[in-house]
Amino acid sequence: MNDVQKILEELCRLRNFGSKLGLERMRSLMRELGNPQNAVPAIHIAGTNGKGSTAAMCEALLREQGLKCGLYTSPHLLRLGERIQVNREILSDEKIAAYVQEVYRAAKIFGKPGDRDFPSFFELMTAIAFLHFSRERCDVAVYECGLGGRLDATNILEPQVATNVIISSIGFDHCDILGSTYAEIATEKAGIIKRGQKVFSGWLPVPAYTVIQDCCRSRGAFFEDVSSLKKTLPETNLFGEHQRHNAALALAAVSSFCKKNVSAGALLKIDWQGRWQSMTLEDGQRLILDVAHNEECAKALDAMLAQTDKKIVAIVGVLGIERARAILKIVSKYARKIILVRPDQERACSQEELESCVPDDFKGTIKFSSLAEIFPKARKCIEQTDDGEIILVAGSCYLVGEALAAVTGTPSFQVHLQDKIENLKK
């Protein structure tokens, strides 16, 4: 293992200590680094689902305006550097390693890696993003919150920097941390809203909508309900009605940022892997990869599968029983066969747990397998479909990353270099 890989593995080991919600440590770290987050104007995005797609849409629209754009999202699918991109060029392992060493030096004020107060994996990646976008002299950056919003590491962005905010959706996910009602979850997401900002949202459950609107009012932020505008939803090459909602949010926020009505043309050329990503295998079979990983995603998946009007062979792996129940309830409506796999993550459901989540009235075949067995080489799948059927890989982002690596024959993929979320006190 070379020095770069050793540094990345050490960075990854910080995930064993979980997320560390709160802002004071992040503020202190960034002061040590010269507060680079203040150097680049930003659009800040929170929400249960759709954050990544909306961020990619914002980035494409901004870049079409001739702006040099930073993009910070999570998690990644194949390479750690996917999280930090400038004009869609991912950050190389070598540059990440160099930044890690620099940030470690600044983080000595908290002790050493593994100490209780040392920054988390996500905090360090966020710090690297702030540094990189500043040094690349980006004209603008788009930041996706990692978890929640109020206590997320990205939330040290000041309102004069992040002048525009998007709340993409509110649904049930990470309820043990964010709350068990729409209102509680919306309160956490709305924590990124600050005085003077322009806040764009829409298509929210009524209790969540009320919270977002009230937060804007009480904090002196301008709220625009994009769903209420009498405009035709913009078209995008990403499939699904929910993606047109995301496109409308992105277009509104970018138009506000640029202080003009921005052309929607870039929305037809979005490159965002794992979102109903269609591939043709070597034998002509159609494969769809989709990161449908919670209840709200399951509803969107239902709508997309209904539109295709095809039976499927479903390959499913999920993190968390409640999520698995929601996904398998939908998948079972369309599947002739369900293949249950376990992503290479310690929080992943076992195949037996997944089987217990398949509805009792499912009449098709259930099988246990692994991605290595299903996809023995690039563009090859051992599962055979009947005429017109689709092979669907759905569930955890980690599952989709592993499947994408297998199907594309990507060597040395970095699905294991991920965050870890634990139940923590706020």
Image (cartoon, grey):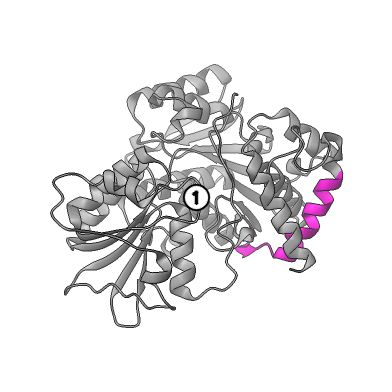
Magenta stretch mostly in which secondary structure? helix
Instruction: Give the image quarter of residue 144.
Output: top right
Which residue type carries mark 1?
Answer: Gly
Seen in the picture, residue 272 relative to 286 is either above or below; the reply is above
Q: Quadrant of residue 88?
A: bottom right
Above or below: residue 167 compared with residue 216? below
Q: Quadrant of residue 424?
A: top right
Give residue 86's position: percent from left, percent from top.
Answer: 65, 60
Residue displayed at 76% across by 50% down: 131
Task: Say which quadrant the N terminus sits in.
Answer: bottom right
Name the residue at 54% across, 37% down.
147
Q: Quadrant of the C terminus?
A: top right
Q: Which residues are magenta?
A: 85-105
Point out the residue furthest to the bottom here: 283
Report if residue 12 lies within the magenta region: no
Instruction: List x then y, in percent, for residue 90.
Output: 63, 63
Residue 388 relative to residue 425: left or right? left
In the displayed orientation, state which residue is furthest to the front. 352
Q: Is residue 76 left or right of residue 275?
A: right
Residue 264 can be seen, yes or no: no
Q: Residue at x 64, y 60 (%)?
A: 81
Q: Is residue 46 visible?
A: yes
Where is mark 1, residue-wise?
52
